[in-house]
Image: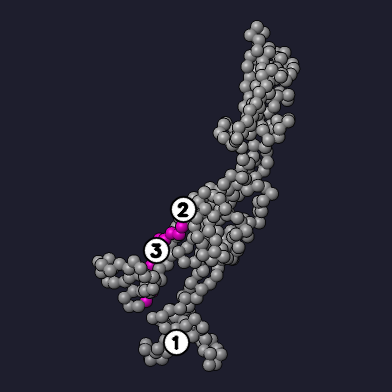
Amino acid sequence: MATVVNSVVERHQGLGGGDDTTSRSTTRVFLVELTTLGTDLVTTILADEDIPQPNDQHPDDSGIRVRNRSVDLVNDDDHLHWEVTVEYSNRAQGGGGGSDPDPWDLPAEVSFGSAQYTRVLDKCYRMDTTVAAVVSALDDTGVPDIKVLNSAGYAFDPPATQEEENMTVTVKRNEEDTDFDPDDLSLFRNSINKTAITIGGVDFDPAQGRMRSIVASPAYSKDGDLYWQVTYTIEKKTDTHIRQILDAGFYHYDADINTTLRIMDSGDGDGGKPQPVTEPKPLDGVGGIGDPDSPIYLAHQTYLAKEWSTLDLPEDQDGVS
């Protein structure tokens, strides 16, 4: 048998309220008369259109909302008269002090991780014929400036590789629908920072950070307002995200005749006649033949630079700008 509500009347008896420096609250009481008593008693009473629903605003105070409702029996004889107590407050659902903030007003969450990858080794800190020799004089202050070559002076085939990782900073925050721009997902993803910036307490020099990903998913506040849960993942390199590529090739530029020519070997092979080289040779940074002992690395910007300050990402680890 289903419960049927006959009438709902608000009572003045039982009204109350209060406030302090951080919150205010009030109570409304409703008398409910049933026509039929069923097993779905509480659900039916609380769902009635004349009973305030969770998070409804108070009719005389829009700053407080329904936080709790209870149903109690009034008449033990017929079980058809019940009382609903509705408590309003500006506290968060389930208690706690202060106002219940909108999701987009909460501070961002900042976390740290790493991005792993494998790269081809072209330079190292130390090189010797035995592990013991290298360990005996480990370099702890220099830079990797020794070319990784075999004992004959050629690159390894296949090339030597190394596992490495960069630090990542992840910012997760809620953004109000009116502030969220879907274009940011494409405009800023894979971009590098154009100017110096601090994010989550981490300082990024220009081009030192790369926006690895921006992920957004829709959500709704307790009031039914659309907002977005957005996660930014930023990779920080020790140097920069400007790629340095060895200047080398099979051709060189001859400035005297304004022509590009095939690089030839020394002619020390069979017949003594110079032959086209069969592997790339170092260049000098302007197209000429370079010095193998002083290789030139050309700098390439391969990611679009963007002004990240427009994203208003938090500056400190507490998620606050």
Q: What element carries label 3?
A: strand
Instruction: Identify whether 28 is placed above or below 181.
Output: above
The type of residue carrying mark 1 is: Met
Q: Position of residue 185 (x, y in %)?
A: 62, 55
Name which residue lies at 63% across and 30% down.
Answer: 19
Magenta stretch? 154-167
| Dot 1: element | loop
Q: Residue tagged by mark 3?
A: 162
Q: Does the magenta stretch include residue 302?
A: no
| Quadrant of residue 55 within the rendered picture | top right
The nearer-to-camera label among 1 and 3 is 3
Q: Earlier in the sequence, mark 3 or mark 2?
A: 2
The residue to which callout 1 is attached is 264
**Tag 3: residue type?**
Gln
Residue beneath the point at 44% across and 80% down: 282
In this rendering, the answer to whether 76 lies above or below 245 is: above
